[in-house]
Amino acid sequence: MTGNRNRPRIVICPDPLAASREVAQIIAAAIEAKPDIVLGLATGGTPVAAYRELVRMHREQGLDFSELTSFNLDEYIGIGPEHPQSFRYFMQQHLFDHVNVTPSQTHVPDGRGTDVEANARRYEDEIRAAGGIDLQLLGIGTNGHIAFNEPGSPASSRTRAIELTTETIQANSRFFDSIDQVPKHAITMGIGTILESKRILLMATGEGKADTIERAIHGDADPSHPASLLQRHDEVTYVLDEAAAKRIAV
Ligand code: PGA
């Protein structure tokens, strides 16, 4: 990691399915190279098909998840792990229940209880005790957020509670029955936590992400667009479909 602008590796795929396969292949190769890898995982609409592909690789090719440790980026505050829109539930449903992970080695931030900041500090300790994250998967919000680090999140930020922006609540309301049900707060790894990962893999698909991807890669590295701060990291790979890549120069 340096203070300079680094050039990311950019992989442009013809469509979202091809991008999902590419992401799954990168993750599978990393697991095969280091079976006890520490993986950082993401939720949202974007990685769903990549997880489906990893499940297929487990079933058909014996991809072995048993030794790895995982840390998810974020979790809502105010809904528990049994809630179908919680990120723990998402991970069980889309990946963990279908592969041979060791359940105690999968971690999702804990938004429960009265002292979320203590949960956040414990999460940082757990990441450190695991030896740090080897490969972190990220999505990106249209407002440039990575995990739930909303615009204004400093490069040094750590795991903490955060208030979600109206834009994020609106974007995530598609997963809930109504917008009133979307939690207004979350616990999220910080930008500083993410930047300490050894490798970062950001996936984005669809025309709706084209502007934010352009700003992340070509804009100034500035907390007003959190993903632009990834320019400080020297091992970032973007996997995009053509629609999300349409405004970038490669
Ligand atoms: P999405 O969310 O994959 O549902 O677009 C991405 C994000 O908000 O990080």
Image (cartoon, rainbow, N blue to C red):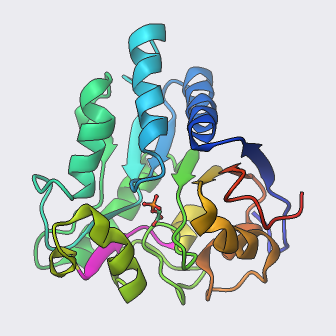
Whole-percent x, y for residue 190 in the image:
48, 72
Picture residue at 40% right of the left edge, 38% below the top: 69
**Residue 59, located in which quarter of the rendered image?**
top left
Q: Is residue 217 above or below residue 68?
A: below
Q: Is residue 47 above or below residue 37?
A: below
Whole-percent x, y for residue 154 in the image:
57, 85
248 or 236, nearer to the observer = 248
Q: Is residue 64 visible?
A: no
Quadrant of the image for the N terminus? bottom right
Q: How many marks?
A: 0
**Residue 117, located in which quarter of the rendered image?**
bottom left
Does residue 189 belong to the magenta stretch? Answer: yes
Left or right: 83 as drawn, with respect to 207: left
**Residue 250, located in which quarter of the rendered image?**
bottom right
Whole-percent x, y for residue 167 in the image:
42, 83
Whole-percent x, y for residue 205 in the image:
59, 54
Q: Is residue 238 visible?
A: yes
Q: Is residue 138 above or below residue 24?
A: below
Q: Is residue 150 above or below residue 205?
A: below
Q: Look at the image and give the residue range highlighted in magenta.
A: 184-190
Picture residue at 55% right of the left edge, 72% below the top: 191
Picture residue at 56% right of the left edge, 37% below the top: 17
Does residue 72 belong to the magenta stretch? Answer: no
Left or right: 208 as drawn, with respect to 104: right
Picture residue at 46% right of the left edge, 55% below the top: 128
